[in-house]
Image (cartoon, rainbow, N blue to C red):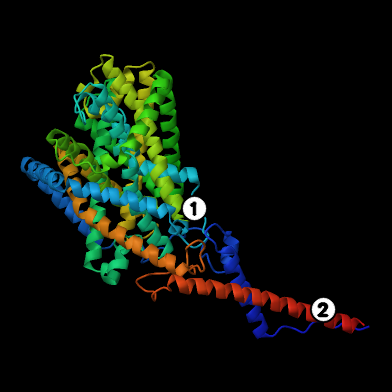
Amino acid sequence: MTETKPPARTDQQEKHSKKIHTVAHNFRDLSAMHTPSHSEDKRYGLASVDQEIPHRRGREHHVTSVFWIALSITVAIIALCLAFPAPFAAAASGACSFIAANFGWYYLLLVALIVIVCLVLMISPAGAITLGDPGEKPRFSFVSWLAMLFSAGMGIGLVFWGAAEPLSHYAVSAAGGDVGTEEALRDAFQYSFFHWGISAWAIYGLVALALAYFRFRKKEKSLLSVTLKPLFGKKVEGPWGKAIDSITAFATIVGVATSLGMGAMQINGGLNYLFGVPVTSGVQLVIIAITTVCFIASALSGLSRGVRILSNANVLIAVGLIAAAMVVGPAAHMTDVLVTSVGNYLQNFLAMSLDVAPFNDAHRTWINSWTIFYWAWWIAWAPFVGVFIARISRGRSIRAFLGCVIFVPTIFSSIWFAVFGTLSTGAQMAGTQLAQLSTETVLFGTLAAYPAGQVLSIIAVVLIFSFFITSADSATFVLGMITEDGCLEPHRRTKAVWGVLLSLIASVLLVNGGLDALQNVLIITAFPFSIVMLLMTIALCRELHHERRMMGLYLHPAALPDADTPFRSYEDDPPDDPVAVIQRDIAIATAVTAAVEESRDRAAETDVAGEEDDT
């Protein structure tokens, strides 16, 4: 008996078998609910790298004209602020008042639209699209990712306003009634939740989503200008794109410089309350100098060490401070305030989002001073925060990204305001005149009214200092990316230069009293950038719709882009209509079935031939 081996496959048969396997893999595994492993993705050419690889040293590390344009605008504005302080401050304040009075409705409508778009994207089939190659895994752990985006977004702002804003709404300027009343107290928490909740994080989330989507999915540069390519094509690579990126860099410089100044003032206020350190510009300059050394050292260590470790520490200290505050304060009452205020916030969310108060001049003035100011402030900060959040969010789905970016910080912010707002308003009602304190010292005055107040104040100073370093560290990273043509790993020298420049700007403004004027400039900058955000929203929706159609993503995708050739509406041929997609799915299913049956028949014939040879 002679054993006969099956005939060797020809090249054509091998090619046909490989094609069948690839089609079967696409039809079976590439659903919106399937997350292939990295080895599986790389085997089929769907993943290019396991994680982000820094640029090689060379031409990638050069600053572009955006660096010089943004720096020139900043220097010119500061020179005007210092040379003509009173006229400049009056002009900036007048411009802010004009925008709030005449375009308040526009800000409210824009932010409401952004919230709606984010919610629709979360529940739509496009929410399954990954911010990266199909099946790619996130680089940072879930906890570290949340900590970093929260620290960069508004960590230091919460510490600054956590006790002060509810107190102001209750005892200084009430939203809808007389100060010191039950209605004023209820509105104080409701509006604090509103100003720091879903709307604010939807602004950040949309900008970050657009940047992450075009960078990691479309393989474009990490620049704000490229997000407009679906509308304007390669025109954004010219002067208009440079102008948009320069505005982004300028807004980041001004926003971080003012935050550095306010952070130094609050740390100085805390040291004054704790140890009697005088509140002077000299002390604040020393604080900025110490902080500068720390955040530049952190920035030079990279994202995976400096920012990540600091952000995790921030969250741990913040949670510890909340827990300690609940121990020394009325914990049950804080919980009652949280639950009731969340209900009021959700119940009145739509009314607050669209309330311009045309029939009540006093309430309209209040809205201009608080809600419109906050919306402009978040829009002005969105470029900086958006670039940073996008940078750390590779590998997450759009649905998970938006859900976490919008709702997790909102929940944490609500808890923060419920705890520290209850402490400040409770101390005010008990007779402590906290409303007479400056904003930067309200937190320490509040803690001093409760047991272990000095210990809690020390923890608060440490937290402010840590948030301070993290925000500045993130800013140097973002400015390095923007001014090095979207480089994911900007050169250390560029980050160090921006760190020193930010500190110098904050120091000069502190000494000369120009922080308020520069803050108004930032609010003015938000107006042109709000138009860019509107265009960005339209461009993002158009591009997502295009990719969804190209993928045939209605319930499950029929096709996925290759790792290095993404679907792009500004380069692709028009996608198939839904009928053609269904027909293509049927054709794929038929081809798979026929291929499997053909393989079985061929295997059966081979077995029969083998048995005959054995016989």
582 up-or-down from 437: above or below: below
Q: Residues within 10 Å of mark 1 (few under 14, many from 20)?
A: some
For the point 48% across and 72% down, the residue is: 581
Tag 1 secondary structure: loop
Mark number for residue 70?
none
Residue at the spot x=52%, y=64% of the render? 47
**Mark 1 lies on residue:** 139
Q: Position of residue 366 (x, y in %)?
A: 18, 35
Residue lying at the far top of the rendered structure: 431
Marks 2 and 1 sit apart, C-alpha to C-alpha, by 49 Å
Q: Secondary structure at mark 2?
A: helix
User: Residue 108 versus residue 223: which sits nearer the camera?
Assistant: 108
In this orientation, does residue 351 appear?
Answer: yes
**Residue 395 coordinates in the image, percent (x, y):** 48, 56
Q: Residue 81: x percent and y percent?
A: 12, 44
Q: Residue 76: x percent and y percent?
A: 14, 52
Q: Amino acid at mark 1?
A: Arg
Based on the displayed image, in which of its 4 quarters is residue 178 positioned? top left
For label 2, the crowd category at 10 Å Cα-Cα, with few meaning under 14, some 14 to 19 and many 20 or more, is few
Quadrant placement of the C terminus: bottom right
**Relative to 40, residue 390 above or below:** above
As rendered, which of 212 and 57 lies closer to the eye?
A: 212
Contact? badges 2 and 1 (CB < 8 Å): no
Q: Amino acid at mark 2?
A: Asp
The quadrant the N terminus occupies is bottom right
Query: Circle 2 is placed at which residue position?
Result: 607
Residue 566 at least partly seen: no
Give the foreground label among 2 and 1: 2
